[in-house]
Amino acid sequence: MVKWLGERSVRWRNEKLAGRAVGAYAQPGEPLRVAAEALAVIDPARVPDLDVGARLDLPGAGRVRLEYDRDRREFLGEVPVPAEIGGGEVALVFDAGLGGGEAATDQVRVGVRRTNPEFTRPTPDAEFLRELSEAGGGRLLGSPGEAAALAAEVAGRRARAGARAWAQPQWARWGPWALLAALLCAEWAIRRWGARQAQALAASEGAPLPPAMAKGATSLSMIVAALVAAPPNLLAQDDPAPPPCTWTKRSPP
């Protein structure tokens, strides 16, 4: 194992610059920490003066110069990762000027991590919330007190609107309902009385009742028609006088 690692080390491959990503993944919209080590320079005094940089292998990506850390003996820095980066991984390119016109480069690939911003950023986005509230015709509330005041104001508006709407309709009053009930009762009483009168007249004349009236289905128009068709003498006829009484005297046997 030691021999395999030694054969595949950067020094065995005679690479002059070795770069790496400190983080395991590149997060879109977040800076990526990187580190690089210059292997071609033997004089330690010259190492801090080297121009070592890193960039993403993307169109328009800018180069970031790395700063030398004497404690770790390597160059450190942060490379910005675009928020709209695509793909599952991205290449990270390192370069260094070693002096005398000599340069060294190295390239590593880093995976791109896709996560929901809702889980990575628990704090609210005030600017987004403000734009969202203004788009809907509202406003952004900055404190719980403002939210409570707004809720009380909305409740008061709804109460006033409900009170005005309840006082306007006529069906909410008792007067129309009482008048309707009285009319229905009067119509029922007239129908009952008229039906009895029509049946009495028809029985005295010996005429059959209409089929609908014989079945009990009477209406105000049928009652009026029956009363109008009755003979006048029947309507004005008085009760006949009783026959005179006669007495017969019988002699005793």
Image (cartoon, rainbow, N blue to C red):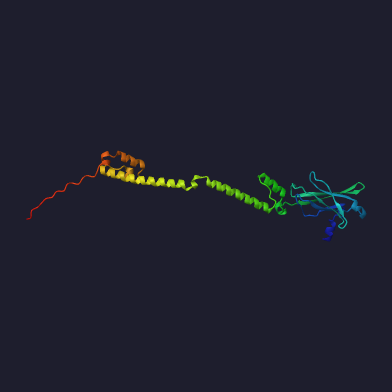
Estimate the x, y position of residue 202 in percent, counting from the top left. 28, 43
Q: Residue at 53% of width from left, 46% of height from top? A: 167
Give the residue at the far bottom of this rendering: 1
Quadrant occupied by the N terminus: bottom right
Q: Nearer the viewer, residue 4 or 167?
A: 167
Front in this rendered view, residue 41 or 2 = 41
Quadrant occupied by the C terminus: bottom left
- Residue closest to the eye, 17 or 227: 227
In this rendering, the count of numbered labels is 0
- Give the x, y percent position of residue 130: 70, 47
The residue positioned 38% from the left and 46% from the top of the image is: 186
Closer to the camera in the image, 19 or 141: 141
Residue found at x 65% / y 50%: 150
Residue 72 rendering spot, x and y as whole percentages: 86, 57
Residue drawn at point x = 67 percent, y = 44 percent: 135
Camera sees residue 116:
no
Question: Farthest residue in the left direction?
Answer: 253
Apparent side of residue 65 relative to residue 140 in the rendered image (left or right): right
Q: Position of residue 149 (x, y in %)?
A: 65, 51
222 to the left or right of 165: left
Residue 196 visible in the current orientation:
yes
